[in-house]
Image (cartoon, rainbow, N blue to C red):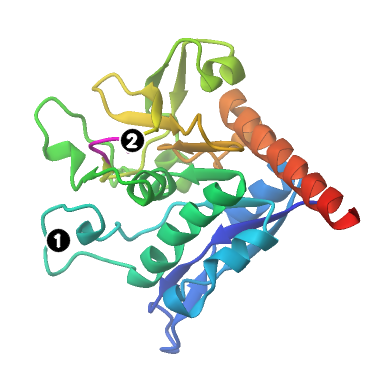
Amino acid sequence: MPLVGVAATYSTDNPNRFPLHTTSDKYLRSVIDGSGAVPVSIPALGDMLDVRRIADSLDGLLLPGGRANIEPHHYGGPAFPDDEFIDPGRDATVLPLIRACIDKGVPVFGICRGIQELNVALGGSLHYRIHLLPGKEDHRMRRDVDTIEERFALRHSIHITADSLLEELAGEAEVMVNSLHGQGIDRPADGLVIEASSPDGVVEAVRLPTAKSFTVGVQWHAEWGFENHTLSRRLFEAFGQAARERALSKNRVKAT
């Protein structure tokens, strides 16, 4: 089975006061059940890691969501408020790792924060708070409901770009998705193409067509209930297929 790295979050919320590198169970299970791959967590240790060696060892890279937003100095944005939750260790790990994976032909799949990381790693910029922009809806997680099922419920439609990979996977021009993000893409990085947008114009999916392998980011939480969401399920399947092709290619090189 192919090996898929899953970016971890650095957390100091542990009651025992020991910092943790955490990866949500739902992402790990989606790699196994959705992509047919073996997940391995990549700690948020920044410069302590040799990202190019890590990329060499991987057959895929999954960029999951996370509580912290990417710090604005990575994309030339205005400074965050002092109380903004940040994760500099993940920023320092993932942004160069994305570039190394793309360079080496490792498939990359970004989800929620992951689409934003993909965009920033390639030179794009972000909006800090989409809901404060004129004409934009509030895409943040609902706080007026009690259950996780309600918070991850389908919230709005997305319009899929004609003749895109997502249209091929979805088989239709519009689908419903969930929405749990405050930050989002402002200027797409050079080379990224927009594969889907929300009715208020928020970028919901991007792809790097010049990449050697599957390189896609989506703004919704595709890992949540993907078994019953055709587009999300097919994205995980396509990512898994690309990871298997990467693993076979590595094995052929070793055999020679």
Which residue is labeled 1 in the image?
A: 80
Residue toward you, 55 or 241: 55
Q: In the picture provided, is 115 more to the left or to the right than 39? A: left
Q: Amino acid at mark 2?
A: Asp
Gap in Å between the C-alphas at discs 2 and 1? 25 Å
Identify the magenta region: 185-189
Indicate whether 45 appears above or below 84. Answer: below
> SS of the residue at dot 1?
loop
> SS of the residue at dot 2?
loop
Residue toward you, 201 or 210: 210
Q: Residue at x 56, y 45 (%)?
A: 108
Please state the horizontal and vertical placement of residue 217, each as a whole percent of the image: 46, 38
| Pair 2/1: label in front | 2
Please state the horizontal and vertical placement of residue 129, each as a whole percent of the image: 18, 45
Q: Main secondary structure of the magenta part?
A: loop
Please state the horizontal and vertical placement of residue 18, each as a whole percent of the image: 45, 88
Q: In the picture provided, is 102 more to the left or to the right than 38? A: left
Residue toward you, 165 or 141: 165
Which residue is labeled 2 in the image?
A: 190
